[in-house]
Image: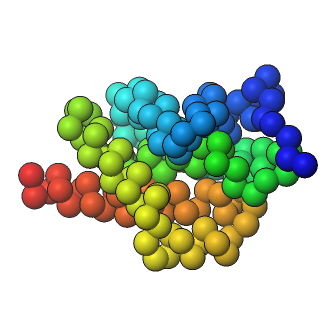
Amino acid sequence: MPVKPDMRNPVHFLAFGFGSGLSPKAPGTMGTVAALPIWYVAAQLPLMGYLVVLLLVIAVGPWLCGKTSRDLGVHDHGGIVWDEFAGFLLTMLLVPVSIATALLGFALFRLFDIVKPWPIGWLDRHIHGGTGIMVDDLVAGLYAAICIQTVLWWW
């Protein structure tokens, strides 16, 4: 029987996106909403600072998500949204800060994360553990990043 996350446990608290993943509807979307302020603050840093934040989020993700998943007894529990943080921060790499870019990046990332075009869906089904939880969102973030950079280039 799967157990509920313990929000007093810092690993669960982070994996569940500071509680945003507890949303009964669209926890992934709520996790991406929770990533917006993190992006906004990180985007104020020089590029190297943003990259450090992004790489730290990605580096701890497989362990954080994998540990929480094992604790709960559910692979890729819908409430684990640390992967959304990583995917959205990747989407927004080198994107200027504005309401329009935040909305565009948000929409593109959620689109790719939900629709899961190849190879995102394949990765989601075939790679397990913490790495599996992270990798599909990172590829969704990469797809969204390519799209938003293309829009910005043409704009």
Looking at the image, residue 148 sits to the left or right of residue 154; the answer is right
Looking at the image, residue 146 sits to the left or right of residue 39; the answer is left
What residue appears at the point 49 percent right and 76 percent down from the top-left corner?
Answer: 119
Image: 141 above or below 104: below
Point out residue 16 in the picture as x, y percentages from the top left corner: 66, 36
Counting every numbered tag in the picture gives 0
Image: 97 above or below 55: above
Q: Quadrant of residue 148?
A: bottom left
Point out residue 86 in the picture as x, y percentages from the top left corner: 52, 47
Out of 96 and 73, give the one closest to the viewer. Answer: 73
What residue appears at the point 58 percent right and 62 percent down from the top-left corner?
Answer: 135
Q: Residue furthest left?
A: 155
Q: Is residue 109 visible?
A: yes
What residue appears at the point 17 percent right and 56 percent down from the top-left corner?
Answer: 151
Looking at the image, residue 136 sits to the left or right of residue 155; the answer is right
Image: 147 above or below 39: below
Q: Is residue 17 visible?
A: no
Q: How is the image coloured?
A: rainbow
What residue appears at the point 10 percent right and 58 percent down from the top-left corner?
Answer: 154
Q: Residue furthest right?
A: 1
Point out residue 91 in the picture as x, y percentages from the top left corner: 38, 51
Out of 67 and 5, give the one closest to the viewer. Answer: 5
Point out residue 133 in the picture as x, y percentages from the top left corner: 65, 57
Image: 85 above or below 146: above
Q: Residue furthest top?
A: 8
